[in-house]
Amino acid sequence: MAKNKKKPLLPGTFVRVRPLSEIFSSLDNNGTLEGLPFMPEMAKYCGKVFMVSRKIERTCEESEEGMRRIKNVVFLDNLRCDGEAHGGCQKKCMIFWKEAWLTTELEQKMPVEKSEEVEVLISRLPSKLSDDTYICQSTELIRATSPLSLFDFMSYIRDLKSRTYSIPELLKAVSYAFFLRIRYYLIGTPFRYLRGIQKQTPRLTLNLQPGELVRVKTKEEIIKTLDKKGTNRGLLFTRDMLRYCGKVYRVIGRVDKMIHEPTRRLIELKDTVILEDSVCKGCHIIRGGCPRANYNFWREIWLERVYSQDNQQPQNPKNEFMVNEHRANIS
């Protein structure tokens, strides 16, 4: 008799996160499953029900800056890491969930776990190392994934079967990525970033706070803040971010510190925020975009406050404009 093949977890499927003790038993000595860590920030979701929002067959990775193959992973609703166990990192990355950590048996009675036992298990999950570097899902993606060959055309089929993208979405993304590269080879316009004109890039401090409304400046205004490598003080303005120019968004939060994936170190940033509904789609990626949905980082000099009619005064009227020397490290 043929064995019943386990059904894939597709978007729209409701799942329950397994108890922490069950998940812990699936991890190796490094606290990972197939190279992917189960982070302390994920423990609070154990036993709760969520909907699968996306099945992931590939993802970008910042250490080698490529698209890589990942297996048996989904996103749940819009669950993002709060960085509490990782020095207060403010990147708010989407959390990767191995399918083994989830169950579709929603009516199954979950074992009651004692709080003290849970705390012990959480303390054994990886986060900070002895050399003041950190381990999280983002830093370990290089080890939790495998190279994706340029000639792996099944990648497109997997995206369609997993409903990561529809046929029109995939065709649109792939054709635009090819257009960007053809233009690059013909006239030299960078396909990944917006090239600027500055040798030393300027800085603007707005002290934006969560909940404030801002308008993204025009392409022409932003070019004046960038160097020839497309950065403002080391932070890249990608071509993917052009779609947001001229539109109004709400500030989700500041990004004053984050874990730098290649070095695993917590680094500081200045005058940088993330905006609601502004995520990277990887428009330059020939594979058909990137499903990881990282928030774009916005320098405050790329934004301007939007005031309501009953409040024409800025909440923080002290805006300072300074010119800093371009630095190789993000700050």
Image (cartoon, rainbow, N blue to C red):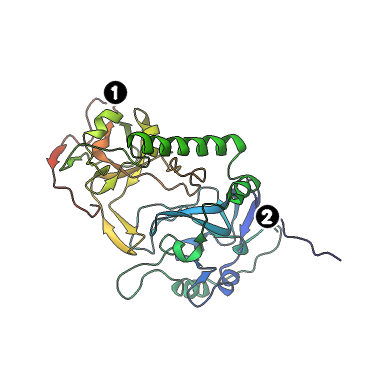
- Residue 201 point in image, percent of width and height: 18, 42
Q: Could you tell whether 163 is left or right of 130 in the image?
A: right
Residue at the image position 41 percent from the left and 52 percent from the top: 92
Secondary structure under badge 2?
loop
Q: Which residue position holds label 2?
A: 8
Q: Quadrant of the N terminus?
A: bottom right
- Residue 245 point in image, percent of width and height: 35, 30
> Closer to the observer: label 1 or label 2?
2
Farthest residue, direction top: 309
Between residue 207 and residue 97, name the one nearer to us: 97
Asked if marks 1 and 2 touch (Cβ < 8 Å), the reply is no
Between residue 140 and residue 48, name the one nearer to us: 140
- Residue 303 point in image, percent of width and height: 28, 34
Secondary structure under badge 1?
loop
Farthest residue, direction right: 1
The correct choice, above or below, for 136 with respect to 92 in the image is: below
The correct choice, above or below, for 72 with respect to 30 in the image is: above
Residue at the image position 65 percent from the left and 65 percent from the top: 110
- Residue 5 point in image, percent of width and height: 75, 60
Farthest residue, direction bottom: 29
Kindly indicate the quadrant of the structure image that contains residue 186. Answer: top left
Residue at the image position 37 percent from the left and 52 percent from the top: 91
